[in-house]
Image (tube, rainbow, N blue to C red):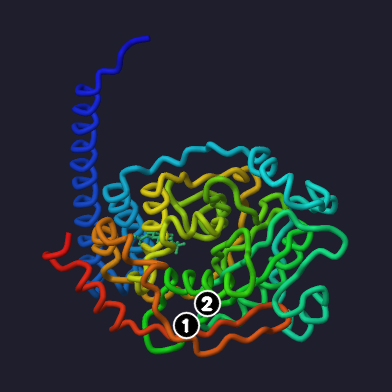
Amino acid sequence: MKPLNITSQAKSKRSDKSWYILSAGLIISVTVIFILDLQFFASTNFIRNTLNGKMLEVLSAADNFTNRFIDTMKHKLIIIDSDIPDSASEQHVTDRFSNHGNCTWPPLNLQGRTPLNRTDIPIEKLDKKYTFMADGHYKPKNCTAYQKIAIVVPYRDRQLQLRIFLNNVIPRIHRQQLEFGIYIVEQTAGSLFNRGMLSNIGFVQAMKDMAYDCVVIHDLDILPEDDRNFYICGDNPIHMATKVEKFKYRVPYHSFAGGISTFSRKQYEDINGFPNQFFGWGGEDDELFARIKRSNYKMTRPFDAHGHCGSVQHSGQRTGNDRMKMLQISRKIWKQDGLTDLEYNLVEKRRKQLYVWVYADINMAKVREKLKKLNSPSRK
Ligand code: NGS
């Protein structure tokens, strides 16, 4: 075998990277100048009147496109290790749990890919439809499930999406013959939405209830369309939202870890959960991906072939302005920022029929106070 020439490889990697950064910079500048020019022209009354508003539509579409484009480029520069090794096959994952249960595997009444049900059904009707659930929990009657799954959903103010979520996820996971609990973790009003911290709170609260084998961090608005996309855990964290409708049934970028991902208890603890320091939309899932790698795990996609997920649109959360900076800082402080330093006030935990409602208060000022200490130059 030809020996590897490490130095020249490293050199060429480095020069590859500078080319990459250079050309990205160039493309971003040209696009931004182009958009600014368009905006200038559109601001003249002549064009506004002549095109009767059409131009503004085109501009806002172009603006959206540029924002997304710039975001993606920033990503590529920050998250350089963006490969997703596909080490786990579907078979590999399910072979692993042959000792733990005796329900038939694969389950007999799976329906394959079926469209989402987007009808809004009142919660009382859902309660009547899913009488097999009590206290937000389900356990197969005639066999022992292979895994006990906690579905954790960070939540705020989306009642319609919640009903659609329940009406789609419950029957699917029921057909998968798993034992499961659903935790809707709601943040009180007053501070920016913090998906990472709500996930950590859900994890802790679920584990207090019982020894779940697996925790699934689940967006409310991304819903599997296929029963063969299993809500289970493997030797490595599993990413389930691999073909998302709003991204034209793809992932928006290769290292995307958002939407739905699963972790065994040990995996979640090893990576120190999600960061607590990401307030507002975006970035916390990129930091999650980085934590998985730093802890010597791989994010795997064993059910990729069946990873189609529908999206239930809603208006977004406010963007986290410092998320790019936080991604940099988190590299240093991730071991102190996550499950290990989780602090919140549990306002209420109520067991409803279809889910456990966890209502938690997050003190943003206090969390950010910690960041100052963790990130102070005197600390290594
Ligand atoms: C990236 C965000 C991720 C987010 C992804 C998809 O830009 O957190 O878009 O977003 N990363 C940063 O902002 C650093 S989505 O279209 O699903 O809202 O998950």
Residue 362 to residue 209: above or below:
below
Q: Residues within 10 Å of mark 1 (few under 14, many from 20)?
A: many
Disc 2: CA contacts within 10 A as few (<14), some (14-19) or many (>=20): many
Residue 132: x %, y % from top left: 82, 73
Q: In percent of the image, x 41 and y 74: which residue is there?
A: 194
Above/below status of 225 relative to 250: below
- Horizontal and vertical percent position of residue 203: 53, 69
Residue at x-position 62% and y-position 77%? 162
| Residue pointed to by mark 2 | 155
Say if 272 sits above or below 289 in the image: below
Name the secondary structure under disc 1: strand
Are the residues at dot 2 and dot 1 in contact (C-beta closer than 8 Å)? yes
Where residue 103 appears, as percent x and y from the top left, is 82, 53
Which quarter of the frame holds ligand 1? bottom left
- Residue at the outermost top position: 1
Q: Position of residue 334 (x, y in %)?
A: 32, 60
Depth order, front residue of 322/24:
322
